[in-house]
Image: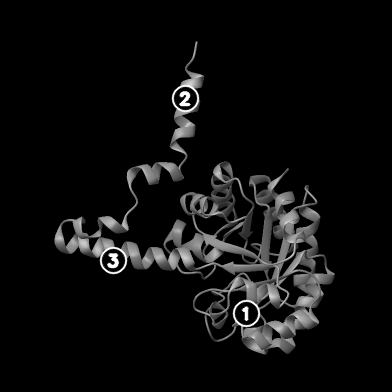
Amino acid sequence: MSTAAQLREAMAEDGCLSVPGVHDALTALLAERAGFRVALLGGNATTASLLGLPDLGFLSADALIAHVRNLSHVLRIPLLVDADTGFGGPLQVHRAVAALEHAGAAAVQIEDQTPAKRCGLLAGGHPLVSTEEMVEKVAAACAARKDPDTVIVARTLAYSSGGLEEAIPRARAYHEAGADAVFVQVPGATEELREIRRRVPGPLVVNMDETLPASNLNVSNAAAEGFKLALFPGSARYTLVKTVGDVFAELCREGTTRSLRERMASLDEYHDVLRMDEFLHLERRLAKP
């Protein structure tokens, strides 16, 4: 069964899936090892990891495609790939989705910002394409699939400038254009989530980033409100910045990490994540005469 089919099967079950954000193959393996059934490769996290830049439209399609190929080579659970704006108009979206699917993505998310996009967590509104253009992009994304199980997620950031009364009509239009799941970016108050569920058909996505009010909910709350995918895009990168930053500061200051060893994995634990034993076994088997 393909990873896209695995994701479709999981989404067809009752309840809401927890989806941790990852930014490289190592964090993706950690998500799989923890028992998650799907992981999110976020545009924000990928831009920071690959380029060391903020989420302001710096990531290119080809850089993302190559990154997805590396993750998919080792990951055994479905990967939801955030393709930002799709890197252009409908033609560019078609190419990006086809290439990401070929690279191993089980699901691809596109959003309705202009190519001069801004991090969805920034205040002050976001530059949006018209509803009509985004509908064309959603249709192009759906048409690009070779595997009908590949999931297309359409995200709207209209709430930041126009509230639910602008976001919900867009979300409905994207669903009607063929999106398999719709993601309305909102702070995440329960009342807002209920209104979205009441007025937007189909599977829905909620952002439970730790910077948002939605982070005060848990996945069972999201399930109770009728959401299918609960994204935690920032958990890994926020932890990395804080924890690795503290370790490096201690090492720079003290010249040793002795006081921090209990916060570190052992070599065996590290090798287990990377499946070292599997590769050593394969090496021995291949070396037999």
Taking 256 as reference, is 60 left or right?
Answer: right
Tell me the number on the disc at residue 127: 1
Q: Give the x, y percent position of residue 149.
A: 77, 52
Query: Where is mark 2, residue-wise?
Result: 283
Q: Which residue is drawn at 41% across and 62% down?
A: 52
Amino acid marked by disc 3: Asp
Query: Where is mark 3, residue-wise?
Result: 246
Q: What element carries label 1?
A: loop
Residue that sits furthest to the right in the current view: 176
Q: Which residue is drawn at 45% across and 58% down?
A: 49
Q: Do the residues labelled 3 and 1 touch (CB within 8 Å)?
A: no
Distance between the alpha carbons at the discs numbered 3 and 1 = 36 Å
How many residues crowd mark 1 within 10 Å: few (<14), some (14–19), many (20+)?
some
Q: What element carries label 3?
A: helix
Q: Is mark 2 on a helix, strand or loop?
A: helix
Q: Residue at x 52, y 71 (%)?
A: 56
- Tell me where residue 245 sits by quadrant: bottom left
Q: Earlier in the sequence, mark 1 or mark 2?
A: 1
Amino acid marked by disc 2: Glu
Q: Give the x, y percent position of residue 147.
A: 78, 48
Figure quadrant of the N terminus: top right
